[in-house]
Amino acid sequence: MAFQRKQFDIVLGRIKEPRGKIQVVIGPRQVGKSTLMDQVLEQCPIPYTLAKADNVDPNDLNWIKRVWESARGTMVVKKQAEHLLVIDEIQKILHWSDAVKEEWDWDCTNKVQLKVVLLGSSRLMIQTGLNESLAGRFELIRMGHWTLAEMHEAFGFSLDQYIYFGGYPGSAQFIHDETRWKRYIKDSIITPAMEKDIKLAANIYKPILMKRLFHLSCSYSAMELSLNKMLGQLQDAGNVTTLANYLDVLGQCQLVCGLQKYANDDARKYNSSPKYQVFNNALLTANHRGKIETIRTDADLWGRWVESAIGAHLLSAAEEEDYQVFYWRERDDEVDFIVATDDGCVAFEVKSGRRKMSSGMKEFVKAFKPVHSYIIGTGGISFEDFLQTDVTDWL
C-alpha cells in the first residue's frame, strides 16, 4: 500500500459525515495534497466529480459554476442521493471564493446533498478568500511539510539525509544525484512558488527584490540578521518596511520566515532583528553550493543545518497545532527556539556543535519561567527522537 499521511483519515472521515461544511485542504507546494486526495477517492463511499483548475483561464469565474452544475446534473440524471465535488488548485481562479459562496448557498437553500472538498497550495490566497467570502462555511485541513518519521517510512531517509535534503517527497528519488536534486527543487518548487503562487497571492511591486530576499533568507536559515543589513546585502533601492512585508508573504506561503525575538511586549518583538528560518531544509540546501560530504564534515556548518531542521520541524506544525515560534537573545545569552501557546512557553536549545553553550537557557528560565525547557542534542533529547516525534508531545 502507498504511504498515507495522517490527513487521509481526516479527509475520508469528513466525507462520510452528513453534509455540513466545505472541507478545505491547504498546504505548501509538493507536500502531497493531490496525491492524498487521489488516495481518498479510491475509497470514497459516494460518487464524485474531480475537477482541476491547473490549466483554466484565471479570469474564467464561470468555470466554477459550470463544474458545480455538472456535478448537480450528474446527481439528477443518475438519481444519486449525495455526491462529492473536489476542486484542486482552486486558488488559481481569481475571485474563486465569491463563486463558491454563491453555489454553496444555492445548494443549502435547495437542500442539494452535494459535499465539497477544495484543495489549494497558496495558503495566503486561500485564507484571504475564506475569510472574505466563506466565513462560517468551511473547515480547514492543514498539510505541513513532511517529517523525518514520514520520509523514513516512505523513502527510507536516514537522519542525515533528512537534515540535508529536507522533506519534499517528490525530490526523494534524486538525492543520489545532488545536481539533479537541486535542479528539481529550484524548477519544481522554488520557481513556481515565486513566479506563480506569490504573484497571485499578493501585490509584489519589486519581484526581483522578493526573489533576492527569498534566496538570501534561505541561505541565512538559523541565523540572525537585521533588515537594514539584509537590505545592504541585497543592494536594492527598497526599504526595511518593504522587506518586512515581503518576508511576511514568504512566511505565509510556508517558504521562509523571520522569527521574532520572544519578549513580554509586542514592541520589543517587532523591533528585533529576525532570525531567518526555512520551513523545509531543502530550501537551505538548494541555495548552498556545497555538497553533503563537505557540509557534513564541517562541524560548525553542519550544526547550522541541524538547528535549521529543528526549527523547520517546529514551524511546520505551528499553524496546525496553534502555537507561535520565536527565538530569544539578551547580549550573549540566547535560546534557539521558544514555542508560545495559550498555556505558556516552552524553550528549546539545540546543542549541535555549532557553538559553545551559553547560560542562555538558565537566564531565560529565570526571566520567563517556561512550562518546559529542553536541550536537543548532546546530553539531551537526540535529534532523531525529536524530529520523529510530534511537537505537541513536548509541549
Image (cartoon, rainbow, N blue to C red):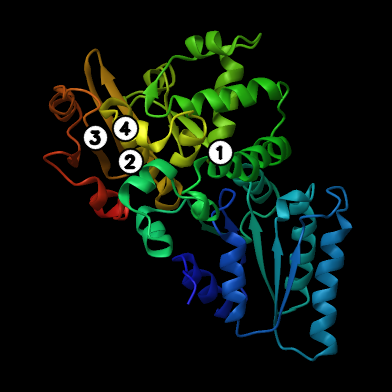
For residue 302, the mark is 4
Query: Of helix, strand and loop, which one carries label 4?
Result: helix
| Residue occupied by mark 2 | 310
Judging depth in this view, the residue of 306 and 330 nearest the camera is 306
Q: Quadrant of residue 232?
A: top right
Which residue corresponds to the image point at 29% horizontal and 32% vertical from the top-left? Answer: 297
Q: Position of residue 52 (x, y in %)?
A: 75, 62
Which residue corresponds to the image point at 79% horizontal and 65% vertical from the top-left? Answer: 103
Q: Position of residue 187 (x, y in %)?
A: 65, 41
| Residue occupied by mark 3 | 350
**Identity, as a three-letter code, of the amino acid under mark 2:** Ile
Q: Considering only order in the chain, which callout, 4 or 3, is on the residue closer to the N terminus?
A: 4
Crowding near pointer 1: few (<14 within 10 Å), some, many (20+)? some
Q: Which numbered mark, 3 or 4, is in the foreground of this view? A: 4
The residues tagged by marks 4 and 1 sit, at their Cα atoms, a distance apart of 27 Å
Tell me, yes or no, whether the two marked residues, 3 and 4, touch with CB atoms within 8 Å. no
Q: Position of residue 192 (x, y in %)?
A: 68, 41
The residues tagged by marks 2 and 4 sit, at their Cα atoms, a distance apart of 13 Å
Q: Is residue 359 above or below residue 184?
A: above
Q: Considering only order in the chain, which callout, 4 or 2, is on the residue closer to the N terminus?
A: 4
Q: Considering only order in the chain, which callout, 2 or 3, is on the residue closer to the N terminus?
A: 2
**Identity, as a three-letter code, of the amino acid under mark 1:** Gln
Tell me, yes or no, whether the two marked residues, 4 and 1, touch with CB atoms within 8 Å. no
| Residue occupied by mark 1 | 252
Judging depth in this view, the residue of 383 and 48 nearest the camera is 383
Residue 395 visible? The answer is no
Tell me, yes or no, whether the two marked residues, 2 and 1, touch with CB atoms within 8 Å. no
Residue 29 visible? The answer is yes
**Identity, as a three-letter code, of the amino acid under mark 4:** Trp
